[in-house]
């Protein structure tokens, strides 16, 4: 039986807030501390997203945490409502249609990192079967770790703050 994904809406709300901060990038006031966020990338093609995923998976120190995480395939998704990860095929499906030459809403770094987090979790049999695998603590902790590895600790701290503000639990994710 599949466990209900109780935390999904809160995780999505927190990530949307964090993604908006990444859209602006630059210096932010984070509870009285000045942090500098990178400006997130947007991708115009599936090939560009595939290159990004290959680069992330090749660059992060994932062998100790996720030794069975192999490559991931990125494909276009027909529907425009959501991106998703297909564990059986190790595939990320992204809606790519935008308007007037602007990439679609899901063609950004925040969404790609979200789906790559699913890929890492589902590559590990012991994590994939946990209650938090979909969008619970296992997911949020892994995503904060991945963001720290890829975008830096300040971006991960802001994501962690967004998760906490949405009532979502994050475990220790030290890189």
Image (cartoon, rainbow, N blue to C red):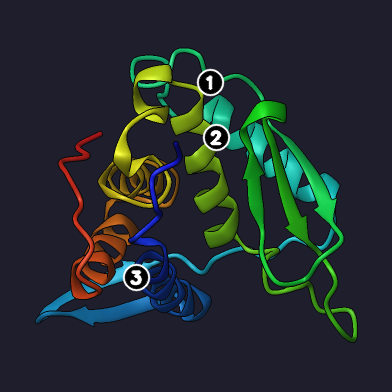
Q: Is residue 96 above or below residue 116?
A: below
Q: Is residue 60 above or below residue 139?
A: above
Question: CB under 8 Å between callouts 2 and 1?
Answer: yes
Q: Is residue 24 left or right of residue 163?
A: right
Label of residue 69 in the image: 1
**How far from the left and from the top, in percent, is residue 112?**
60, 52
Q: Is residue 95 above or below residue 139?
A: below
Crowdedness of circle 1 by 10 Å Cα count: few (<14), some, many (20+)? some
Question: Label 3 belongs to which residue?
Answer: 10
Q: Is label 2 or label 3 in front?
A: 3
Q: Residue at x 47, y 42 (%)?
A: 117
**How far from the left and from the top, in percent, is residue 151?**
42, 52
Structural distance between the alpha carbons of marks 1 and 3? 27 Å
Q: Is residue 5 left or right of residue 73?
A: left
Question: Label 2 belongs to which residue?
Answer: 119
Q: Earlier in the sequence, mark 2 or mark 3?
A: 3
**How far from the left and from the top, in percent, is residue 20?**
47, 79
Crowdedness of circle 3 by 10 Å Cα count: few (<14), some, many (20+)? some
Q: Earlier in the sequence, mark 2 or mark 1?
A: 1
Q: Secondary structure at mark 3?
A: helix
Question: CB under 8 Å between callouts 1 and 3?
Answer: no
Q: Secondary structure at mark 2?
A: helix
Q: Residue furthest front?
A: 1
Q: Residue at x 35, y 50 (%)?
A: 152
Quadrant of the frame with the C terminus: top left
Q: Residue furthest left?
A: 32
Which image quarter: residue 87?
A: top right
């Amino acid at each position: 039986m599949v466990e209900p994904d109780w935390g999904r809406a809160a995780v999505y709300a927190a990530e949307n807030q964090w993604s908006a901060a990444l859209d602006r990038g630059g210096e932010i006031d984070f509870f009285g501390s000045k942090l500098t966020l990178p400006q997130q990338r947007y991708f115009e093609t599936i090939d560009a997203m595939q290159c990004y995923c290959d680069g992330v998976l090749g660059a992060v120190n994932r062998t100790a945490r996720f030794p069975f995480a192999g490559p991931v395939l990125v494909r276009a998704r027909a529907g425009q409502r959501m991106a998703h990860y297909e564990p059986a095929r190790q595939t990320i499906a992204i809606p790519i249609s935008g308007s007037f030459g602007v990439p679609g809403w899901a063609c950004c770094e925040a969404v790609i990192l979200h789906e790559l987090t699913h890929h890492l979790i589902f590559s590990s049999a012991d994590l994939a079967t946990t209650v938090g695998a979909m969008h619970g603590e296992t997911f949020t902790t892994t995503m904060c770790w991945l963001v720290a590895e890829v975008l830096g600790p300040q971006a991960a701290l802001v994501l962690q703050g967004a998760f906490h503000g949405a009532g979502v639990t994050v475990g220790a994710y030290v890189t």
